Image: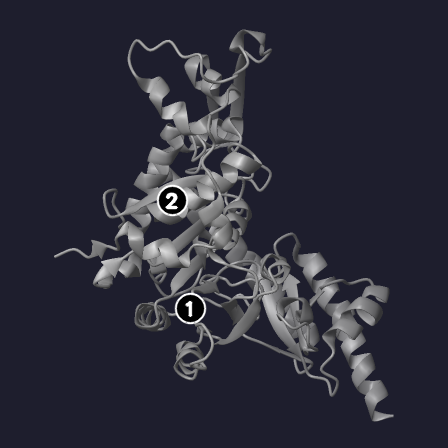
């Protein structure tokens, strides 16, 4: 028997006061009524499309089956398809694009329509993550975050003056033991967290990917302690490990007695174009309604035109060519990883420690120095020597000192990787030498 979706009323205690008080848009709430056959609508103040100067858009792209670029694909957007892209559209996203995402989630995660979840398109995954956070978290509440944590979400929680509770991570991803100890020792006088935030593949900044065993344990703990999981997964399609890719939380949820504890955030930024600003969230309808109401009063919708462009290309490819393209992208980043790691061995062996990433575009390494202050070294000596990385302190909720550094290898060629590691090694050796004097 398949798992049952959690009922809509289950989510009421999870919604923030802001989400509960936000009212639907009086205009956008009536948009669906315009679909009635024969209806003459005087509803929306939409500009007349006859005033728009664009008549067609032609895209030229590399074929996923020939990534070297010899075979070019041409995609033309015109007629009704372009008209839809130039006009206001539904808050949750263009129906054609949403249907494509439904098919993708079924192919990649085994999740089918009718299981109590739906999709909303966002202006990048960061957009819908921010809206989810504001819809779920009240000021001052406790939130569970893996540590180190993606620096881009910290301002969201900090602006709400949240109590950020760190869950340890290691080379196997988030530590379910750390999560269990935190939850089981939680003070009875204090409200338990409602939300766990995690980046399970190629985590930014550590590059680590959570094992299937860890994921199953985290899901079970979420059920035992009544948590929602914010599965931020921009590097899902950048997995290049030797072992098969572990299933997502969104997929593994099907093993539970009920589904509906996972809000999954996907992004096209790393695999199609970061400039398109297209991401999407999949999850239970009551939570996505809260996200959509936020969108309706902030930006009305994600750009119809960028959705139309993304859909036209993806629809022409089909799911199989899309998967082929993502495999090409992951192979590209695996080669970049190998080049950068070789440069680290050449110039940083014995000076830093690291675990090899199996997804994403980052190395997270520890400086082997007496002083656990990577920020001082990175921002002064390394910068003055012509190399810049990100000190690990920005990924820690309390901003404490750390010996760790994040290095992004996505843009470097072999010579640049070699020179960057040489310059950094020169700095670290200089600090170690000065420490002996």
Pointer 2 local density, CA inside 10 Å: few below 14, some 14–19, many at least 20: some
Pointer 1 local density, CA inside 10 Å: few below 14, some 14–19, many at least 20: many
Identify residue for label 2: 323
Camera-side residue of 71 and 87: 87
Let me know if residue 329 appears in the view. Answer: no
Q: Residue at x 46, y 25 (%)?
A: 27
Camera-side residue of 261 and 30: 30
Q: Residue furthest top?
A: 50
Q: Please state if 308 lies on the left or on the right of 33 as rendered.
A: right
Q: Position of residue 58 (x, y in %)?
A: 53, 20
Q: Residue at x 35, y 63 (%)?
A: 246
Q: Is residue 101 above or below residue 177?
A: above
Q: Residue at x 30, y 39 (%)?
A: 103
Q: Please state if 409 lies on the left or on the right of 98 as rendered.
A: right
Let me know if residue 406 appears in the view. Answer: yes
Q: Residue at x 47, y 32 (%)?
A: 25
Picture quadrant of residue 248? bottom left
Of the numbered discs 1 and 2, the one sitting upstream in the chain is 1
Q: CA distance from mark 1 to mark 2?
A: 22 Å
Picture quadrant of residue 120? top left
Q: Position of residue 101 (x, y in %)?
A: 36, 39
Q: Position of residue 363 (x, y in %)?
A: 59, 67
Which quarter shows the C terminus? bottom right
Identify residue for label 1: 210
């Amino acid at each position: 028997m398949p798992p049952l979706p959690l009922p809509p009323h289950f989510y009421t205690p999870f919604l923030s006061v802001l989400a509960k008080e936000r009212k639907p848009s009086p205009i956008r709430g009536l948009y669906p009524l315009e679909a009635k056959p024969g209806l003459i609508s005087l509803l929306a103040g939409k500009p007349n499309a006859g005033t728009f100067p664009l008549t067609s858009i032609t895209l030229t792209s590399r074929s996923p089956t020939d990534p070297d670029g010899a075979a070019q694909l041409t995609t033309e957007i015109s007629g009704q398809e372009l008209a839809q892209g130039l006009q206001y559209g539904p808050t949750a996203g263009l129906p054609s694009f949403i249907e494509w995402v439904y098919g993708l989630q079924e192919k990649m995660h085994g999740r089918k329509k009718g299981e109590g979840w739906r999709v909303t398109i966002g202006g990048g995954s960061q957009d819908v993550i921010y809206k989810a956070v504001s819809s779920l978290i009240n000021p001052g509440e406790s939130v569970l975050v893996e540590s180190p944590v993606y620096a881009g979400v910290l301002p969201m929680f900090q602006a709400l003056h949240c109590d950020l509770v760190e869950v340890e991570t290691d080379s196997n991803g988030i530590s379910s033991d750390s999560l269990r100890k935190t939850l089981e020792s939680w003070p009875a006088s204090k409200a338990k967290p409602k939300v766990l935030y995690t980046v399970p593949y190629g985590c930014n900044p550590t590059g680590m990917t959570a094992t299937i065993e860890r994921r199953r344990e985290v899901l079970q703990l979420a059920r035992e302690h009544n948590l929602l999981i914010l599965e931020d997964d921009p590097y899902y399609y950048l997995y290049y490990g030797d072992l098969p890719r572990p299933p997502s939380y969104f997929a593994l949820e099907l093993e539970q007695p009920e589904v509906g504890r996972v809000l999954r955030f996907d992004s096209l930024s790393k695999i199609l174009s970061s400039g398109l600003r297209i991401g999407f969230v999949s999850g239970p309808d009551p939570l996505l309604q809260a996200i959509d109401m936020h969108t309706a009063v902030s930006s009305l919708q994600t750009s119809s035109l960028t959705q139309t462009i993304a859909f036209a290309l993806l629809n022409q490819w089909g799911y199989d060519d899309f998967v082929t393209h993502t495999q090409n992208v992951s192979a590209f980043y695996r080669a970049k990883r190998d080049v950068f790691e070789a440069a680290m061995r050449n110039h940083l062996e014995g000076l830093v420690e690291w675990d090899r990433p199996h997804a994403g575009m980052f190395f997270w390494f520890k400086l082997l120095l007496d002083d656990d202050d990577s920020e001082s070294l990175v921002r002064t000596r390394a910068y003055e020597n012509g190399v810049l990385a990100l000190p690990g302190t920005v990924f820690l909720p309390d901003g404490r000192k750390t010996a760790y550094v994040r290095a992004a290898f996505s843009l470097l060629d072999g010579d640049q990787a070699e020179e960057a590691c040489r310059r950094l090694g020169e700095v670290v050796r200089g600090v170690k030498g000065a420490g002996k004097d």
